[in-house]
Image: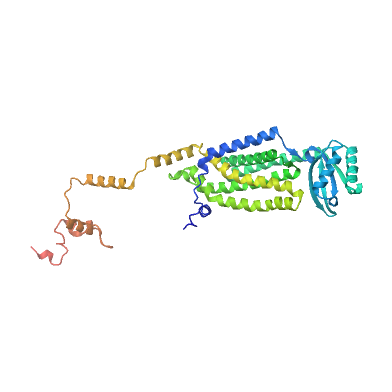
Amino acid sequence: MAAESSLASRLYRGEAGLNVVGKRKMWFTAAAILVLIALGSILIKGFNPGIEFAGGNSFQVPTSVGTMQQAEDTAGESLSTEGAHVVTAQQVGGAGGSFYELRTTQLDQAQAETVRLDMAERFGIDPNEISANRVSEAWGSQVTNRAVLGLVIFIALVTVYLVLRFEWQMAAAAIFSLLTNLALTAGIYSIVGFEVTPSTIIGFLTILGFALYDVVVVFDKVQENAKGITARNNQTYGEAANLAVNQSLMRSVNTSVVALLPVGGILFIGAGLLGAGTLKDLGLVLFVGMAMAFVTSITLATPLLVVLKNRDPRIQAHNKRVEARRANPVPVKETRSKAASAVAVEGEDEEPVPAQADAALAGAAAPKVGARPAGKRSGGARGGRPGGGNRPGGAKRR
């Protein structure tokens, strides 16, 4: 019994009764505060763009020179002579072996060559073992423009689908939840100072589909619960939507956990323990975005849908009928007593019927199956004595 009444069991059965929709003012207030903080950080602090967006240089140093920290410190000493510094450092593996990729602030061709030779001398290796590349910010701008165009097209197509599949209120709530998710994820990048790379942009576009998946699952259950709701006076639209959230909550939790486990493996094991730096940018944005998508789909999308639907005159009238019925309930005992009083008023001028006669009348009121109606009996039709004309010998009696 204790296991069946636990919170986990009730969540799996959709019987937890969590009042998610009823606390929508709290969710909206919290979301507004977080979005304002995120936008403030983006406008004031900005992002930490990688060299693909800000421009810079990249140096590849063999791992034989020592640890990555040693390579970064030595490269920093060489760069300081030219007024530059190391932005990021990561270990990259390739077919020819692994190497350290050191990304620096922007240098011209002469400065980059001077730094390369100085680094080779400090490391005690051949200068040909260190390769240098210059990255222009123009390429990053092209990636950003294409990503923004893809985002606009995606939102337009998804809006059309949601309107056709559900209704415009659901489409508006889903898009609002999606944009809030993107704003919060971008704000976390700005606040923490994570580097923004092309992999980050790809990750942002990837989380769009996941963010909408949870919303569509919940809205499908809302549509099922609210079907024909105006014909019933026992549940408001908000209660039907809240029930849908409880019924699909564990499905959303399971989906999010299953999706976050491999992403967490990429981020913490691949990038953290194994040092696969190329996976860090993609894994980080996916992990943050998917976690925020789960929260916004539950606490924002459905409550906003209820706010929009409650403005519909049909839903308003339905909600008022439900509230009026609950405010003035009619007890069953009172209904029965009123019916008994009505029967007593109708029969107050009649004489009481004895118990034997009542039983006889009750027996007469229930004719046997196949018996002819009493009104068609020949004796009653002629007005003679009952049974006198049909009984044998009755005509001879005087």
What quarter of the picture does the C terminus occupy? bottom left
- Answer with left or right where residue 280 lies relative to residue 340: right
Q: In which quarter of the image is residue 379?
A: bottom left
Residue 324, percent from left and from top:
40, 39
Residue 266, percent from left and from top:
71, 52
Residue 240, percent from left and from top:
49, 45
Q: Residue at x 58, y 49 (%)?
A: 217
Q: Which residue is drawn at 85% across and 48% down?
A: 61
The colour scheme used here is rainbow
Residue 203 seen from this side: yes
Q: Residue at x 53, y 40 (%)?
A: 24
- Answer with left or right where residue 294 lies relative to residue 326: right
Residue at the outermost top position? 44
Q: Quadrant of residue 73?
A: top right
**Of residues 182 and 337, the one drawn nearer to the viewer in this rendering:** 182
Residue at the outermost bottom position? 392
Say if 244 sits above or below 365 in the image.
Answer: above
**Of residues 344 and 27, the one drawn nearer to the viewer in this rendering:** 27
- Answer with left or right where residue 270 lies relative to residue 215: right
Q: In which quarter of the image is residue 146?
A: top right
Residue 330, percent from left and from top:
35, 44
Residue at the outermost left position? 398
**Of residues 369 and 26, the one drawn nearer to the viewer in this rendering:** 26
Say if 254 sits above or below 173 in the image.
Answer: below
Number of callouts: 0
**Of residues 252 and 217, the one drawn nearer to the viewer in this rendering:** 252
Residue 308 seen from this side: no
